[in-house]
Amino acid sequence: MTAGVGQPKRIEKLKHGFLQLAIVTFYLYVCFGAIIVYKAAVLKSYNIEFAPWGLGIVKALVVAKFIEVGELMHLEKRLPGMTLAWYLACKVAVFAALIVALSFLEEGVAAVLHGRTLLEGFSEFAQMGWLLILSESLLLCLILIPLLGLGAINDALPEGQLHRMFFGHR
């Protein structure tokens, strides 16, 4: 059985896609991990134990996959004449909203896994209060700006240019 003519190209695309997913996951894991450490430190000062260390990697993987799917679906469109800043602001807003919705669902699933009802999980999310939800959303936007910004800049430059700017010749 011989490989088709397009087989090496498909394998390269898969490798590139996996590498992109790994890089985004790592970046998100570092960011979410920093937030978890900060949250644990603040709560510890009030003698409250908080140590969901595995949650950071799971959330990073899920969010990275959502970002990848969102990119493939082109959830946002760059309109002719739209500046890169406005495009990035729109893209960050769309993806942040998607991830906040994911967090809402995450609370429901976590409740079910712990023997509670889906409605109880959603209720707990709502009880966090608007200030906490807003602060987490703002932190998420701050995390997404460099990630999505570099992607937007890369899309605006000739292919491979950003890579060459960061790492030299390919």
Image (cartoon, rainbow, N blue to C red):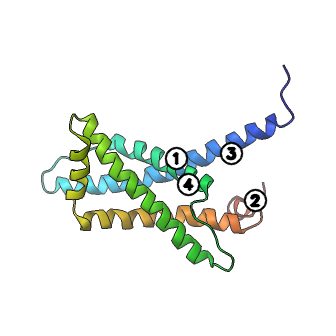
Which amino acid type corresponds to the residue marked 1 in the rendered image?
Answer: Lys
Question: 148 or 68: nearer the eye?
Answer: 68
Point out the frontmost of discs 3 and 1: 1
Q: How far apart are marks 3 and 1 (CA)?
A: 14 Å
Q: How far apart are marks 4 and 3 (CA)?
A: 17 Å
Q: At 62% across and 42% down in the image, what residue appears?
A: 18
Secondary element at image label 1: helix
Q: At 65% across and 45% down in the image, what residue appears?
A: 17
Classify residue 63 as left or right of residue 156.
Answer: left
Which badge, 3 or 1, comes first in the chain's sequence?
3
Which badge, 2 or 1, comes first in the chain's sequence?
1
Q: Based on the displayed image, in which of its 4 quarters is residue 142 positioned?
A: bottom left
Residue 70: image tag: 4
Secondary element at image label 2: loop
Which amino acid type corresponds to the residue marked 3 in the rendered image?
Answer: His
Q: Are marks 2 and 4 in contact (CB under 8 Å)?
A: no
Residue 65: image tag: 1
Q: Based on the displayed image, in which of its 4 quarters is residue 85 positioned?
A: bottom right
Residue 16: image tag: 3
Q: Which corner quadrant holds the N terminus?
A: top right
Q: Do the residues labelled 2 and 3 touch (CB within 8 Å)?
A: no
